[in-house]
Amino acid sequence: MKKEFLHTDVLIIGGGTAGCWAALTIAEQSDRQVLICEKAHIRRSGCLAAGVNALNAYITEGHTPQDYADYCMHDAAGIAREDLLVTMSERLNSVTRRLEQLGLVILKDAAGNYVSRGWRNIKINGENIKPLLADAVLALDQVTVLNRVNIIDFEVQDNRICGAYGIGIENDTFYVIQADAVIVATGGAAGLYKPNNPGFSRHKMWYPPFNTGAGYAMGIRHGAEMTTFEMRFIALRCKDTIAPTGTLAQGVGARQINSLGEVYEQKYGLTTSERVYGTVNENQEGRGPCFLRTEGISDEQQDSLMKAYLNMAPSQTLKWIETGHGPASQNVEIEGTEPYIVGGHTASGYWVDTGRATTIRGLYAAGDVCGGAPQKYVTGALAEGEIAAESVLHFLLDCDHASIPQEHIDAHLHEIGHFLSDRNTLYTTEQLEEAMQTVMDSYAGGIKTNYRYNAGQLALADEKIRQIEALSDTLHASDFQELMYIYELRERLTVCRSVIAHLAARQETRWHSFAEHLDYPDRDDAHWNVYVNSRMENGEIRVILRDLVTGKGCHYEHQD
């Protein structure tokens, strides 16, 4: 195993949407040196890897940033950070214009105005959106990108981040990275629960399967305060392909119907969680399967849908072609996915101040890993990358320089050496991962239980996850690729423990399906209009309840 020691002003962990934009912002506003570590390859990594056909967070004419913040607060049933939503929303249009300058094709009408898809969405040709971002970053002299380097842990001393440790998956190198400030932009967590499609097709999920909650897990282990992990995200998707449904619902006005042809969406509500809950309930009560009603749309609309899905979910277009039934002749069957933890759609993630500083000094969060501001989508992640970058530049003006003790380096080398050399194991990483997903599916509100759970099930889930966590210490890796899989499993297990603790702590049902607590089936504003936060102390997760940060001009800042 080779060893390499690196130093940089700013380390960005994750070269996805937010990470790329943070690097661009730092380069535009300073001469600071930036190092991006990306587990995959920056040109096709993160949530934008396969492209996207709309920007779903944009302030259209006649609306204001406060309108968008109000929409997000309503969808989250009040459990979100209004200060984060407003500061994010104020930048949505400016980052969109900058994206267009980088080469993104945004559809326009005859008058030259962006073509909207609802009051907060605009249409784009976005198959190449990630390469555009990556190429802009790679052109910067002060930014270095290390592809195929998986960051496995932070270096934190006295609640001050000093850098991180990584493994070079293809060059068998152990990296010690000293940094004066760190931006974590690793995305959310998929693969905690058993997916819709098992076995060979298990990668056919809504959220990228390589987003394992690494950024969450590293922060949790080092005592960072986290927020709202109980607000899981369950996507309503096209059955089998797990392709997005918003293009159908907004693009051609497709309504949710049951097998009897009845429109049921109004009966349950139109928030994101209610759309999923309605579909689950209709199936449970014997009126499934459920569909988006597309039969009878025009040939022009069908052709537009075919092209749109090629930009982001080509498997759906291929399914239409292979079966010989396009959306104009056959309604599209829908289903819920397994739960995810993702701060870009819900409010799960790091507890931050308005500058996106976490509770660990020198560590900033942006994008899906950052909590409090749901409905970020692409442009919101860009906005948070920009905010975090500007905060980092301010922090660097007057900060102490970080250093990493040799004994900490030796401890990480010992752990890696243990996984690479110790062959005394009864299990493979894949077997333990499947066991973890089975536990979460059965006892922590997965597909098997229609996303529902009770206190007894959660207690059992926590016990079993701890057992799997202990077994993960005995795993063996024959190369650095397998070593990455071990760390990914351990990241997911850490996030699972936090999810279980949060689900148990919120003793109400505020978001049907997202957090459906059978012991407490009703919403309880009197006791639970609060944020459920947590901090790991001595290996145990301590729940912290915080007052809501809402109202005009409100803001939250960390207190030393």
Image (cartoon, rainbow, N blue to C red):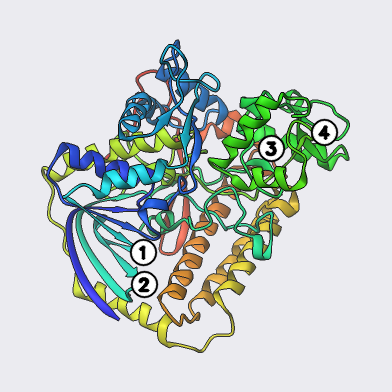
Residue 180 is situated, as x and y percent measured from the top left of the image, at 18, 54
Please name the residue that numbered disc 2 is placed on. 170
Q: Nearer the viewer, residue 78 or 387?
A: 387
The CA distance from mark 2 to mark 3 is 41 Å
If you read the primary sequence from the N terminus, does the residue marked by circle 3 or circle 1 appear first? 1
Closest to the camera, between mark 2 and mark 3, is 2
If you read the primary sequence from the N terminus, does the residue marked by circle 4 or circle 3 appear first? 4
Residue at 50 percent of width and 81 percent of height: 474
Residue 258, which numbered label? 4
For badge 2, the amino acid type reads Glu
Badge 3 density bin: few <14, some 14–19, many ≥20, Cα 10 Å: many
Q: Is residue 416 visible?
A: yes
Residue at 64 percent of width and 69 percent of height: 435
Q: In the figure, is residue 402 to the left or right of 224? A: left
Closest to the camera, between mark 3 and mark 1, is 1
Q: In the figure, is residue 163 to the left or right of 210? A: left
Q: In the figure, is residue 120 to the left or right of 196? A: left
Q: Are marks 1 and 2 in contact (CB under 8 Å)?
A: yes
Please name the residue that numbered disc 3 is placed on. 276
Residue 148, which numbered label? 1
Q: Nearer the viewer, residue 178 or 541?
A: 178
Residue at 74 percent of width and 23 percent of height: 266
- Locate the C terminus by quadrant: top left
If you read the primary sequence from the N terminus, does the residue marked by circle 2 or circle 3 appear first? 2
If you read the primary sequence from the N terminus, does the residue marked by circle 1 or circle 2 appear first? 1
Q: Which of 159 and 390 is in front in this view?
A: 390
Closest to the camera, between mark 4 and mark 3, is 4
